[in-house]
Image (cartoon, grey):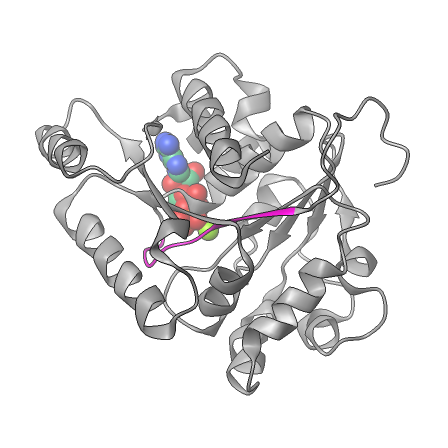
Amino acid sequence: MHGSGGRTRHDGRMHVVAVTGLKGGVGKTSTAVNLAALSAGEGRRTLLWDLDPQGAATYCLDLKPKLKGGALKLLGGGRGGLSRVARTSSVANLEVVPADGSVREVEKILSASAKPHKIIRRLVAGAKDDADVVVMDCPPGLGHVVEAVAAVADVLLVPVVPEPLPYRALERFRAFLADTRSAGPELLAPFLSMVDQREPMHRRVEAQIRSDGGFLAAAIPESSAVARMGEEQVPSVISSPRSLASQQYQLLWAETKERIGI
Ligand SMILES: Nc1ncnc2c1ncn2[C@@H]1O[C@H](COP(=O)(O)OP(=O)(O)O)[C@@H](O)[C@H]1O
Ligand SMILES: [Mg+2]
């Protein structure tokens, strides 16, 4: 992450963007990978931290599912922190903390700690000389990982598929954050994901969401370009920059930057 030429000026503060949510399979990883690529493409030194043991973000960037030393060593406070385990990717300015099966232990390690968010905060803070933006790709579900991430993130992006159940899951997620007091409600930034305009139910729920308010304007459409990331192992904003989905990821990134003040 050194000597990356032509990077934009920044205010010296590192910004933390987390992609979270109760549900799996709703586009969290696709969002984390694409926003990280857009951030890096603007010359920001970007670190994508794959916190999901399934390692989908790691895979989408064509990296080996291998976390050097494993999760216990990383969280245990060994020397080097995130920089020790970060890998360069084929995208300029984008480094990745990959996930392997040991990341399954993160939930357990954090649950055994009195102050789980301190462990994550220390690791993130340790990257501040090497990264302008940290993007965290979270596993689905409500647990200590999400609680700790919520406590350190500047924004929590939550993809919501426009169907009744996912929309209600967002309310449960909101209640979880309030119960655990890990993040204020203003940190939540839900947005529509995997929208299929031909689907009447999607259109109905989207109309409901727009009238309720509180969502970002960006709505990521169901898109073969995004689905192909699992095959091409390149962020779809790079392989298909002009697709509708990429335009919406760009809007999402612009709205995210506005939220966190960069
Ligand atoms: N906008 C989209 N259009 C089409 N397929 C998508 C889109 N977003 C995600 N997918 C696909 O859906 C599956 C789940 O997406 P993923 O980003 O891994 O979700 P999550 O991280 O929430 O589990 C993947 O196979 C991915 O390629
Ligand atoms: Mg995922």
Residue 136 x, y percent position in the rendering: 56, 52
User: 88 above or below 44?
Assistant: below
Residue with the most extreme top position: 242
Q: Is residue 193 left or right of residue 107?
A: left
Q: Is residue 209 left or right of residue 4?
A: left
Q: Is residue 209 left or right of residue 161?
A: left
User: 1 above or below 7?
Assistant: below
Residue 39 appears in view: yes
**Residue segment shown in magenta:** 15-24
Which is nearer the eye, 225 or 108?
108
Q: Residue at x 75, y 59 (%)?
A: 82
- Location of residue 233 by image quarter: top right
User: 25 above or below 200?
Assistant: below
* Residue 253 belongs to magenta span: no
Which is nearer the eye, 232 or 20?
20
Which is nearer the eye, 124 or 66?
124
- In the picture, the quarter occupied by the N terminus is top right
Residue 109 x, y percent position in the rendering: 58, 81
Q: Residue at x 26, y 30 (%)?
A: 195
- Location of residue 206 by image quarter: top left
Residue 234 appears in view: no
Which is nearer the eye, 234 or 247?
247
Residue 168 x, y percent position in the rendering: 17, 54
Q: Residue at x 15, y 39 (%)?
A: 212
- In the picture, the quarter occupied by the C terminus is top right
Q: How many marks?
A: 0
* Residue 22 belongs to magenta span: yes
Q: Residue at x 44, y 15 (%)?
A: 243
